Structure formats: C-alpha cells, structure tokens
Amino acid sequence: MERPIIFSGPMVRAILDGRKSQTRRVLRPQPVQDYGEGGPEGLWWRDLYGAPPELIPGCPYGTPGDRLWCREGFALDDEQCEPSHEVIIYRADGQVRLYDPPGCSGVPMGGPPRLGQVMPLRIAKDAPGLRWRPSIHMPRWASRLTLEVTGVRVERVQEISLEDIYAEGLEPGPYGAANDVVRFGDLWDSINERRGAGWEVNPWVWVVEFRRVS
C-alpha cells in the first residue's frame, strides 16, 4: 500500500543526502494517563487503542513493507519547455525535471502526466514568475521520492536517542551531544509547539523508519 507524507524543504534535502531515515509524527489522539482505581499502566492504552503501546495497530503511515510518497513544495512552469515537454521545479533544492503532459509523447489524454529526466540546472526560490504550490497539493505523479517503511513503533518524543536524532536528519553540531538534543528539541518545537505538542509536553509519537526506494 502507498500513502502520501509531507516533508519540509530541509527534511527533503536530508533524505536526498542520505541523512534521514526516520520521522516522528504526533500520535492522534494523545492518550490520557488516568489510572482510575490503580489499574495497570497498560489499561488506559488498551481502553483507547485496544493494545499496549508497543502493539498499537493502525499507524496512519503504514506498516513495514508499505510505501510512502513524499509531498513537497513545487512549481510548474511552461516557459522553459523543450518541445512537447513542460517542467516541474522542486522548491527544496531547485531541481528541475521534465514531464510529459497528457496528449504529449504518448501520454493518453485524461491520464496522469509522466515524470521524466532531471535537467542540468537549478531554479532559485525567488525566481521571478514562479508560483510555488504548497506541498499538500502535490499530486502522486509529481513526487520524486518514494520511501519504504522498515519499522514502526510508539514512544515519547523525549525518549529519542542521540543515534535517532541523527537518523532524523540533524547533522552533528560543534558543541557536543547535549547541545544536539537541544537543537532537535528546538526543531521539534518549530513544527509542533503551535499545535500543542511541543518538546516540553513530551507527546507520544509514531516513529517511522524508512529507506529510500530508487
């Protein structure tokens, strides 16, 4: 099974560079830790999800063997076309690829466009005339990154190990491991704090491990 997943520009670049092989996404809904009359900790998990934390079913990002296709910011531009081609531009790194629209190069009318070769140029984010489209609007045919899920688990975000921080795409900094944990917390807050799931809240998260599929 294939599912879409959204990544920011820096995380797309980390995947392209081979630095990112994990992503953490906030569990929805968050369980409420209410032991009632002193019941076991697993009880509230079973009441809400039907299984203890390590066995929660139904991860929205799939199970090992499933695939994720990445949505990212992009633009379509027909001013730099080759004959019978148009181009798609990826905002994360300015990469340009040709694509064949329906009716051209053998693509049937009404069918999805066909993504083609990478062009030997990069387009700047502030290039005049480009209309950048939000990642949520990227169609499947335009995605350049497909990932295979290799593992799924549930944990608190603050349980992340230093090794996993780097597997999330953060590069080691010059001030040591403790500072890298702080940096990851800041990165986490930049995405999740406004949604009520900041680092200090220590929410439960899905940990999705993956590998890039050629």
Image: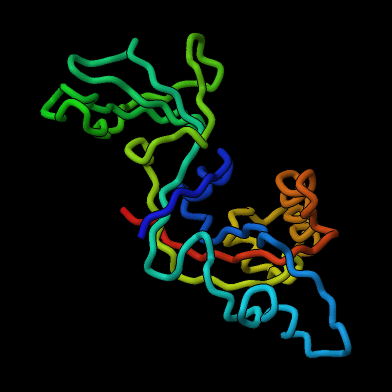
Residue 150: image location, x then y, percent:
44, 69
Above or below, 137 against 213 in this view is above
Left or right side of 72 for 195: right
Residue sticking out furthest to the left: 106
- In the image, is residue 71 above or below residue 211? above
Figure coloring:
rainbow
Quadrant housing residue 43: bottom right
Q: Vertical placement of 190 versus 149: above or below?
A: above
Outermost residue on the right side: it is 37
- x%, y% of residue 140? 36, 41
Q: Nearer the viewer, residue 20 or 201?
A: 201
In percent of the image, x 38 and y 17: which residue is there? 77
Q: Nearer the viewer, residue 136 or 47?
A: 47
Give coordinates of residue 92: x percent, y percent. 51, 34
| Residue 109 is at least partly visible in this image | yes
Picture coordinates of residue 93 (x, y %)? 49, 33
- Using the rendered image of the protein, determine whether residue 92 is visible from the camera's viewpoint: no
Going by the image, does 31 lie left or right of 167?
right
Residue at x 37% of width, y 26% of height: 88
Q: What residue appears at the point 26 percent right and 33 percent down from the top-left corner?
A: 112
Badge count: 0
- Which residue is at a point 67% across and 58% down the rendered structure image? 26
Q: Which quadrant: the N terminus?
A: bottom left
Tell me: 95 left or right of 85: right
Looking at the image, residue 27 lies above or below residue 4 = below
Which corner quadrant of the image does residue 51 belong to? Answer: bottom right
